[in-house]
Every structure is written in structure tokens, then in C-alpha cells.
Amino acid sequence: MTADVKKSKSCLDKREALVLAADLGGTNFRLALITPHGEIIQRQSQPTAVGEGKEVLMGQMATAMRESTAAAGIEPGHIRAVGIGIPGLVEPDTGRVVKAPNVPELDGAMLGSELGRLVPWPVVIDNDANLFALGEHYLGAGRGEKNLLGMTLGTGVGGGLVLDNKLWRGGKGTAAEIGHITIDPEGERCNCGNYGCLETLASASWTVEWVAAQLEAGAASSLQAPWRQTPQEFSAYLIHQAAVAGDPLAQRAFQRVGRALGIAIADVVHLLGLQTIILGGKFARAWDQFIGALDAELEKRLTFFRRSDISVRPAMLDDNAGLLGAARMAWDLGL
């Protein structure tokens, strides 16, 4: 395990109540000890034990939690709860993971109760994009806003809704799946089974596929060489670099992303009257390349709202948003 330990005044007070916040990804399992004020006093990260079975994975998670508190010198009794973000469909009320494509060992698992039997604390879970939105509302770009939509742009497109200062999960905990609203009914078939989802137009993975298809068709671009020489290393990062350098194909790819985001955001604004939208995730770091097309599309499609009344903002908390959202979830439940 690698650890990044941050000492603070709170860290010195071993009597202060804390929560453990966790972010479970297909690559890494991250943990943080967090105070009631949102101060992160210790972080730890280790590779996720994917492919080794549910028992091994949950054992790894439980061990990491115990080691985290021990490393900080915190007695187990000072931890109120554990909040965990899961990359997939979950039922927060029951603690059940319905489907986690990147961590298939947990499909169908009652993670809240099963992991809760391995550690001396109650465990609560939610979708990682929901917790991104909650974290940004708590201490990030949405602080002080009553209502907002948080969107994560990465391998896919995720979303989380905060309405009246509370996370809105919907009837089955699957609200705000903005990545799977239809933008182009004649578009590509999404991994979810629908056609023309926002995710097929505005995510990193689908943008890479689109650019690769243009290159294969012979499009003139500085990306031809890296794509042909090392296609397995062709990435959204390379496309962003090319766009910044002025490559027309790369710039067109991000205009496509921005236009799709603008359509989706206009739909949500018309439905809910939201005025604050926060974009995060690694792919959103290409903000400078897609925000112009997003603004233009939003201006064109907003009919009952003035563009000046709608704030589309970059996230502020980077990788800490989900951890802080998980912590806020635990504290809000009053555990």
C-alpha cells in the first residue's frame, strides 16, 4: 500500500469523531480519514484486487480500512461510519451493488452489510458520480448552491443531482444517469444497449474511437503517425495535445463533445430549471477545447432561460470530490 499522510491539527486530536471515505475503482482503491469539517487528514491508495473474487476484494478493503486507522493512531471507536463510492448501479438504501462493470466481483453483492461484518463500523455506499456531485456541493465548485447537476467525463459520462441541498437518487437510486440520455437517435449503439447516448459523443473512450475511425478513413491529421505506430497507446490525452497544437481533426473532435454536452445540459435545464452545472473527471481537463462549442450550443437551445443565468463550471476538488462526497454521505445519515 502507498500512503500520502497529511498532518493537521485534527490529526493530533485522537478524540475527534471521523469517517472513513473510500473510492473503489477498477484500478485503485482509495481511502481517506475525514473530519466533520471535510478536512482530509490521511489518504491511502492501493491497486484494486480485481479478478480475484468477491471475498478477496472485500477482505482487501476491510484490511485497508483497519490499517488506515491504525497508521493514523485513531482508535476504532472514533470512526463513525464508512462511506464508499462505487462505479456502477447501486441501491443505497439496501447497500446492494446491482452492476459494477469495472469491478464485476461485486455484481449483486450486499456490500454494505457484507463489508460491515468485516469491520467494526456501519458501511454506506452510493454511485461514484453521485458522490462527485455531493462532494462538489459540499466543499467545491457548487458550495453555497441549493441545486446543481454534477457531470463526470471520463471513460463514460456520469451524473449526480443535488436538489434542495440533498442528493436526489430517484426511486431506485439510479437518477441522474445523464450519460445515457439520447442525443442522436440514429447514433452509435452504446454499451448500455441504447443508441446515440450522450456517452457515445462526449466521453473519452468514444471520442478516441471516433477519431480513430476518421484516421482510418484517411483524415489528414498530425495524429496519423501516433495512431498507426502505437494504436494501443492512442488516447484522449494525445487528442487533447493535438487540439491545443491546432490540429483540425482533434479540434473537431472536441467541438463534437461540446455540442453534445450543450444539448444534454439544455435538456436538463428545461426539465429542472437548474442554473448550476459542474463538469469534472479527467476528460473535462480538456475544458479549453470544448467549452466554446458547449456555450454556443447552449445559447442556441435555451428557449425559456437566458444563457447568462446558467453557470457551467469546472470542478474544483479534482480526485478528492468523490471522497468528500462519501464522507458527507456518512455524516448526513447521522451515523
Image (tube, rainbow, N blue to C red):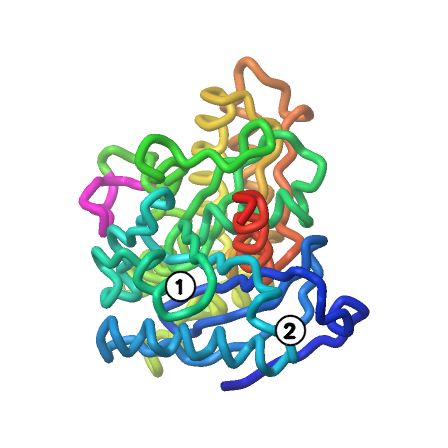
Q: Residue drawn 37% across and 78% down? A: 60
Residue 9, percent from left and from top? 81, 69
Residue 46 in picture, x, y percent from top left = 46, 80
Residue 188 lies in the magenta-colored region = yes
- 151 magenta-colored: no
Q: CA distance from mark 1 to mark 2?
A: 49 Å
Residue 74 lies left or right of residue 50; in this view the side is: right
Q: Amino acid at mark 2?
A: Gln
Kind of residue sitting beneath label 1: Ala
- Residue 287 coordinates in the image, percent (x, y): 59, 52
Which mark sits nearer the N-terminus, 1 or 2? Answer: 2
In the rendered image, the residue lying farthest to the bottom is 1
Asked if residue 245 shows in the view, the reply is no
Give the quarter of the image for residue 100. Answer: bottom left
Q: Which residues are magenta?
A: 187-197
Q: Secondary structure at mark 1?
A: loop
**What residue would you read off at disc 2?**
42
Q: Residue at x 71, y 36 (%)?
A: 144
